[in-house]
Amino acid sequence: MPAAASHAGIRRWLWAVAALVFVMVVVGGATRLTGSGLSITEWRPVTGAIPPLSDASWALEFEKYRASPQYQLLNAGMALADFKFIYWWEWGHRQLGRFIGLVYTAGFLVVLLRRLMPWRQTALLFGMGLLLGLQGTIGWIMVASGLQPGMIAVAPVKLTLHLVFAGLFFASVVAFATWLTPLRRIEAVRGRAGAWFLLLLLFVQVALGGLVAGSRAGFTFNTWPLMDGALVPSAATLFAGTPVWENFVDNVALVQFNHRLGAYVLLAFALWHMLALRRAAPGSGSARRATAIAGLVLAQSALGIVTLLLVVPLWAGLAHQALGFTVLAMGVVHVTRTQQAARG
């Protein structure tokens, strides 16, 4: 995949899409933390772009929401003004998703019709578009899970899938854009396996964070470094439910503990990877990227602790999610650059 100057327009398009996805993730976090995700009870990909424009339309949308389990079990008696607040968050989230789809589709059609790239790279862009469409479908499956009888929020596993697939699409766009960006200098082939393993750990931590968000596990056990009065909570706390495997997604104690463990492992490996590259290739691009990633992971860990201790205020929750995807982007760039170095 060449990084010729003629691809500057494609690079700008891809970086713009990546920036929009980043904003989308933050808006999605705000939608979740404000309890807005179930305010729109229908999936209308086209006509749903038009919000209520009259008092009668607002009354109809409110009536649909009042028939939902979340309203009846959690928000009974909610005023129309409060409903409008959560409605606009969810509508904005969906509207941004539509806009990302339009921007990506328009850019892809330009690449396809003007034959700006070889067919293999064009096919890859098409596959990324399918991934984006799948992400939208998963989003509705997630919302639908929260509209089932007895539910007051979406299913944690489906929220996690929604977040992970957002991360996969985001990573693919960042990787493609990075690959098309010319290298400033030839790099030595260092740390390729470590870079891939670090990226894997980042995705695992994103998934564990999705389970924490979906189960609202961050609103419990708000102490650190101890959790439930110990560094490692008792087995009776971590595995209180049956069957055992359900604790990994439904037990807020184990869900939060796994996210803590994931953070410790990720930080330890990021620091080791940094030190290894600084010894093996001091001053190299790989060493500088590994140092930056280690610093970001350390900052993300500290922010996670602050978020937990403050019981997840909106600003901290959003900052934690935004910084998490910033680290993910850096991990993708690191892998892409090491791959480019390996291929010469």
Image (spheres, rainbow, N blue to C red):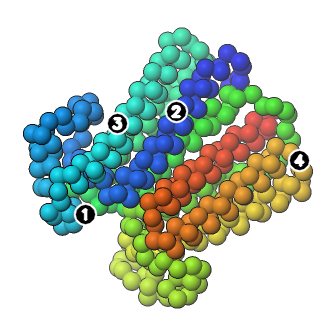
Q: Secondary structure at mark 1?
A: loop
Count the labels in the image: 4
Label at residue 152: 1
Left or right: 324, with 21 as reference point: right
Closer to the N terminus: mark 2 or mark 3? 2
Which labelled disc corresponds to residue 95? 3
How many neighbours does mark 1 have within 10 angstroms: few (below 14), some (14-19), or many (20 or more)?
many
Residue depicted at x 79% and y 57% = 274
Between discs 2 and 4, the one toward the N terminus: 2
Amino acid found under the numbered disc labelled 1: Ile
Vertical arrangement, residue 54 with respect to residue 238, above or below? above
Is residue 121 positioned above or below 150 on the image?
above
Q: Earlier in the sequence, mark 1 or mark 4?
A: 1
Separation of residues labelled 3 and 4 (CA atoms): 44 Å
Q: Quadrant of the N terminus?
A: top right
Q: Which residue is mark 4?
A: 283
Looking at the rendered image, the disc whose residue lies closer to the viewer, 1 or 3, is: 3
Q: Which residue is mark 2?
A: 17
Tell me the distance, in whole angstroms, between the alpha carbons under discs 2 and 3: 15 Å
